Amino acid sequence: MAGITRHHFKKSRPLLVVALFGLSLLLSFDCAAGEMLSPAALPQVLRADASPRDVLSFFERTPYRPDGAIDQRGDFTFFADQQTILSTPGLNCSGFVVAFCRYFLKRNYHLNDVVIDRMADSGFGAEQGEDWDFGYDLILNLTEGMERKVMLPFGQTAAIDGSDGAGLRGFALHDLGAWADVMARMTANHLYLFSMSKPVNFKNYKILHHHVGVIVMDDEKHLWLGHATTKAGVVSMDISNLDQLKLILDSNPDRCSGQRMILIIEVALPHE
């Protein structure tokens, strides 16, 4: 997906990276109610006790911007150039997911922390190529240190520890039976982060985690998928409605090179 890169970050040893990241979680990420900032470039203010659906509505219609993000101060900026403060709103898919998680998981993430190359296998000069697993790294960095698990259909299980973006890709994106099984086990007291991946024929790597987003349940038990798209900006769709789910799947067709997959990570919400 356009704009999700970390070419400005140096390759790091994975054990050291995860240890430092875990420490930063303990020291700086937890936010008391009311401390979260609403971006000045957005006209409305989001209440600290807003529901997941309200948080989605807050960001809906935010325009798409390549590499666009919101920093920990509430300013629109770029992942790659955080010194630039933008007066107009704009997010790419990664920037939206980070911004959404700040409100829902009550952690004021620093942009540098959420783009860490967890396995030191996709930074600048990496053998397999640069940023091929960006989406995979992002959703796991956002949920590091929290109670979480991989959502797989039909009784399947997978461990996160020791995994990488090539081996842990979830289930086939177009398998409606798998979707039905997974969605039936989703609950209102969890957040679901996803990374879509697809086979590619690039020089150094064959898998690309190209798109990320979130899924939440509202008070009526409907499941809403939120993401940022290049054409429409931030949008949400009620995927409890099969026709709405199919619209998303149809916009991400399988190719002759192989199936698209979706990795969904469930994370328990923090207690108030």
Image: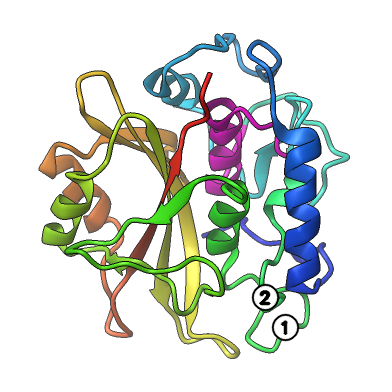
Snapshot quadrant of residue 153: bottom left
* 65 left or right of 75 in image: left
Left or right: residue 180 versus residue 156 is left
The answer to which of 63 and 100 lies nearer the viewer is 100
Q: Which color scheme is applied?
A: rainbow
What is the magenta range? 90-109
User: Is there a contact, CB below 8 Å, between mark 2 and mark 1?
Assistant: yes
Tell me the residue that label 1 is attached to: 126
User: Disc 1 on helix, strand or loop?
Assistant: loop
Residue 89's tag is none
Tell me the residue at 81%/67% (across/down).
Answer: 16
Spot occupied by residue 5 in the image (x, y as percentages of width and height): 67, 61
Q: Residue at x 75, y 27 (%)?
A: 75
Q: Is residue 126 above or below residue 106?
A: below
Q: Residue furthest right?
A: 83
The answer to whether residue 192 is magenta is no
Per the model, the C-alpha gap separating discs 2 and 1 is 5 Å
User: Where does residue 218 sit, x and y in percent of width and height?
Assistant: 29, 23
Q: Which residue is mark 2?
A: 122
Horizontal side, residue 161 vs residue 159: left or right: right
